[in-house]
Image (tube, coloured by chain):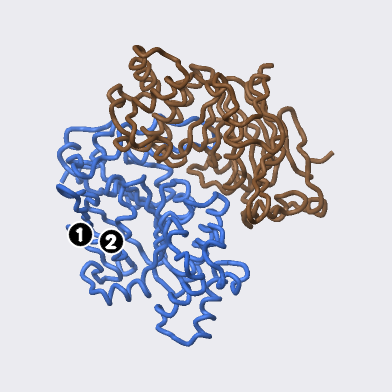
Amino acid sequence: MDELLVVEGLRKFFATSRGIVRAVQDVSFAIRPGETFGLVGESGSGKSTVAYTVMGMYRPSGGRILFRGQDITMPHARRPLALKKELQIVFQDPGSSLNPRRSIREILELPLRVHRLVDGRRLRERVEELLNIVELPPDYAEKYPRALGGGEKQMVAIARALATEPSLLVLDEPTSALDVSIQAKIINTLVRIQKERHLGYLFITHDLSLMRNIAHRVAIMYLGRIMELAPAQVFFERPLHPYTQMLLSSIPVISEEEERLKPAKIVSTGEIPSPVNLPPGCVFHPRCREAWEVCRREEPGMREVEVGHLVRCHLYGA
Amino acid sequence: MQDVLLDVQNLVVHFRVYGGYLKVLDGVTLQVRRQERVGLVGETGCGKTTTMKTIMGILPKPPGVVRGGRILFKGRDVLSMRPQELEHLRRSGISMIFQDPTAALNPVFTVGEQLEDAIRYALGRRDHASVREVALSALQSVALPDPPRILESYPVQLSGGMRQRVCIALALAYPKELLIADEPGTSLDVTIQDQILRLIHRLAEERKMAVILISHSLGVIREWTERVYVMYAGTIVEEAKTGELFARPLHPYTGALMRCVPKLTGTGIAEGIPGRIPDYFDPPAGCRFHPRCPHCMDICRQRKPQLFPVDENHRVACFLFGRNSRG
């Protein structure tokens, strides 16, 4: 049982006035300690829904979530405090995830108090330690979020997530709202923290180039399903799914070396259909240049085509 | 220099705030030739959008104040134009599209109402049938499926990519000589961004139109422009042919920025650029990048470097290159 988190056949549906939104359908993956598992996809692919369901913010419509072998498929309110301590999340927009009326000290003390992690006399010291982990000077404790830059706010959000010494961190587009020069610092800090603490990361981003540099394994989602899952190097060097290929060939890159890594230019066509009204068969078929008759009729299952490389596509059928 | 369409010289723009001025643009100089695709790249808050709004004559004044410089469009000074002349400029000279197509469209009118309004304004034509015809062909030209249905739709009924296509149709319903595209794909998914940039490229070629593409993404700039200006803290720090810039970035800022971009080759990510963008209330003297620059010399703290030609296709505002820039 060396897996930290196991997600099995996860489903999450939302009832809306226009019908049922199948946001997540049959999603399975596992994360090991010290591993960064990347979830990529375009908007509406369901990647954040997966993250929020893992965190217990949504109750799954089906499937199971196991943490260190223990079933945690229950809503957040019913999860034991000791478990909540183990799973923490960092959101995309630090501007709205930090309370503007609390000082950084109060923000960082809150999880320490809730989980009764240190006694009163050590609170001050621990806040300084947390700031130190994310490379912020100790006098930042007295500041308020508005006095901080976007990157610094996100560092505070990371420090807050680390306060309970979790073993799994969910990172939901943690640098998407930031400039690359600031992103670089945050990513490097996250990588260092992971090495020091052997943390598991569920890293969500739409930025494939960033994913290449941080994830050990990558899964790509489209309309609620994982379409392909592989070790990062394999995923980027031998992508199999036509969707993965289309997405990779659409990324603007900055050097010839990268250009050579991209699949031959596949002109992207069409848009993501509404998740209320999913196409029959393979959900990607209306945009797929390889689609043939069976794709319009039957939804392909997930197949392991080589060790650790899974793909959901009729092209790789038995 | 007869083929120069837009010539911005030493533009200085400040913003009045409580207790003083934000000294945002500190001498921006750039040119766009006819039918040229020019990129303007820089990080959040470097003044890309302020520069373009000033060119378009839509800089809010106050708080904006143009302190110096000239903007010549086809040789005529935009800054001294009267309101009617500015209107004429936006009607038939320059158009702009913005990052967020949702904010650029009015949610309570249909696409048709907004598009037909723009066409009536541009053409001065009132005859309903012909306005509708122009509207339909404008939607067709941006490859929107089923134009009659789109005309009847409200923006909320369209996807983000479709809304941006509508914005492009609005901007280009009447022929223009220059299109300013301010982060046109940034709020969209990468496959949709690719489609939008391809559309802009095609329209520019078909209509023999120049484009200024503003982006914070070096990848987008590399793929879609011929010449690039790199902007940092209200100044142009480097200018080069696109291929040349990416092969040989000279300014320490440009190089550092390129190292921060995650590469598809997976070679890791550089440490980032230390410090942060200066406070415009009290910007650093001399080169505005000097407090963050690993090569900073005495002169950099005292004098502002001018753009200095390294060769025919490459200019850089840095004292590491060339004596002229000390002048």
**Chain identifier, colour brown:** A
SS label for mark 1: strand
Q: Earlier in the sequence, mark 2 or mark 1?
A: 2
- Indicate the position of residue A214 as horizontal and vertical percent values: 53, 30
> In the current view of this chain or complex, which residue is farthest to the bottom?
B127
**Chain identifier, colour blue:** B
Mark 1 Cα within 10 Å, few/some/many (few <14, many 20+)?
Answer: some
Check residue B66 in the rendering and tell me which mark sits there, or answer none. Answer: 1
Q: Chain of mark 2?
A: B
Identify which residue is drawn at 51% across, 70% down: B111
Q: Is residue B32 left or right of residue B156?
A: left
Q: Chain of mark 1?
A: B
B310 or B107, which is in the foreground?
B107
- Indicate the position of residue A219 as horizontal and vertical percent values: 64, 36
SS label for mark 2: loop
Check residue B36 in the rendering and tell me which mark sits there, or answer none. Answer: none
